[in-house]
């Protein structure tokens, strides 16, 4: 038996016995739902299964198919996405759903080439959806697959890993093979201390034979991310009636980082601490003796925290007043939720 058949057959035999049960994954004998496959692949980019599972269930309860997502307002979708990070993914989900509704009769196209034409579907997502949802032979390489394949062949670098993955991807059951690779990487072929004694591919694994499993995949040295600084402004007023206070929220510009999402007011994120220059109104601001740090894709961010009270003698503030006690429902991006939590402890 050649190596391709040995690896694919052994892995699929293991998968048939040990596959994970996931809310977006079809059960044995069931047809996959392309919408759920697509949604899960987008949600899982840079996000763990444990985080995505409850969020996925809430999402499909609200938008169960392409048509309902295509009809949703972008601001509503962005609020539901809050906390999952990489917010361009959510905007592209809506754009792609509308393109599917208008150009494809509401049905996801079933080839890699056609899927890549949709907003936000790059090579990986298009391959994953084509293989898992439609049974097409496609080479699917995520972080788990990269780790497994790089160790199997002691392959260094993404081109070499992709070429090796192509060699072992079977013509039949390519979707199951991709999900089996993902499950193996998650459960067995972990970054540290892989469970090689339990691995169905141990006999074929070059890194295991050499005893250097943890040396793969070979990672390029990461460049340090630049630092940015800003100030978050917490402007609070007494609520009408017997309720608690309300805080001013704004909508971030539609284009740009965290575009279109509700947020606490903030000035630009710049190379040096900006102080109070970008406050939403001219009033008596108090800078708290605390900062919030947050890592974004291309830079790290350190935010100073400023608080003030709004009253009838202040200039009108643009934005919307949101109940402080219900702030979790505002769908704030993680960086602003962290700032709000810190201010809540300190004020």
Image (cartoon, grey):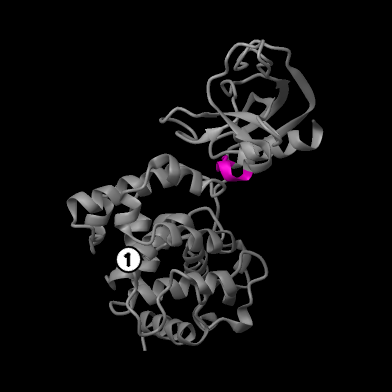
Residue at position x 56%, y 59% from top? 48
Residue at position x 63%, y 16% from top? 279
Q: Quadrant of residue 125?
A: bottom left
Q: Position of residue 334 (x, y in %)?
A: 60, 42
Q: Which residue is mark 1?
A: 34
Above-or-below relation of 31 to 276 = below
Magenta segment, which residues? 328-333
Closer to the camera in the image, 98 or 204? 98
Residue at position x 57%, y 18% from top? 317
Q: Quadrant of residue 338?
A: top right
Above-or-below relation of 341 to 253 = below
Residue at position x 24%, y 53% from top? 100
Query: What is the tally of numbered marks visible in this picture?
Result: 1
Closer to the camera in the image, 126 or 322? 322
Closer to the camera in the image, 95 or 206? 95
Q: Quadrant of the N terminus?
A: bottom left
Asked if residue 251 can be seen in this view, the reply is yes
Closer to the camera in the image, 186 or 75? 75
């Amino acid at each position: 038996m050649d190596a391709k058949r040995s690896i694919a057959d052994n892995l699929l035999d293991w998968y048939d016995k040990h596959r994970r049960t996931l809310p977006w994954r079809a059960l044995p004998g069931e047809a996959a739902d392309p919408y759920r496959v697509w949604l899960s692949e987008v949600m899982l980019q840079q996000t763990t299964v444990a985080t995505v599972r409850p969020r996925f269930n809430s999402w499909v309860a609200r938008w169960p198919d392409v048509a309902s997502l295509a009809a949703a307002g972008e601001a509503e979708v962005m609020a539901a996405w809050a906390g999952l990070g990489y917010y361009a993914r959510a905007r592209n989900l809506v754009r792609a759903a509308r393109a599917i509704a208008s150009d494809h009769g509401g049905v996801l196209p079933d080839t890699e080439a056609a899927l890549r034409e949709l907003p936000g579907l790059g090579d990986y997502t298009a391959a994953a959806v084509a293989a898992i949802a439609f049974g097409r032979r496609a080479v699917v390489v995520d972080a788990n697959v990269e780790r497994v394949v790089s160790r199997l062949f002691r392959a260094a670098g993404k081109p070499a890993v992709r070429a090796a993955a192509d060699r072992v991807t079977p013509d039949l059951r390519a979707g199951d093979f991709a999900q089996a690779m993902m499950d193996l990487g998650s459960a067995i072929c972990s970054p540290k201390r892989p469970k090689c004694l339990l691995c169905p591919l141990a006999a074929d694994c070059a890194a295991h034979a050499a005893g250097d499993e943890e040396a793969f995949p070979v990672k390029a040295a990461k460049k340090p991310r630049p630092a940015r600084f800003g100030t978050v402004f917490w402007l609070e007023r007494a609520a009408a009636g017997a309720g608690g206070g309300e805080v001013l929220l704004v909508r971030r510009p539609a284009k740009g980082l965290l575009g279109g999402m509700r947020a606490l007011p903030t000035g630009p994120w710049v190379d040096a601490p900006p102080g109070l220059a970008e406050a939403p109104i001219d009033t008596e601001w108090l800078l708290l003796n605390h900062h919030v740090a947050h890592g974004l894709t291309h830079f790290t961010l350190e935010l100073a925290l400023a608080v003030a009270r709004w009253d009838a003698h202040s200039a009108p503030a643009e934005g919307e007043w949101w109940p402080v006690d219900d702030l979790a429902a505002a769908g704030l991006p993680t960086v602003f939720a962290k700032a709000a939590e810190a201010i809540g402890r300190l004020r």
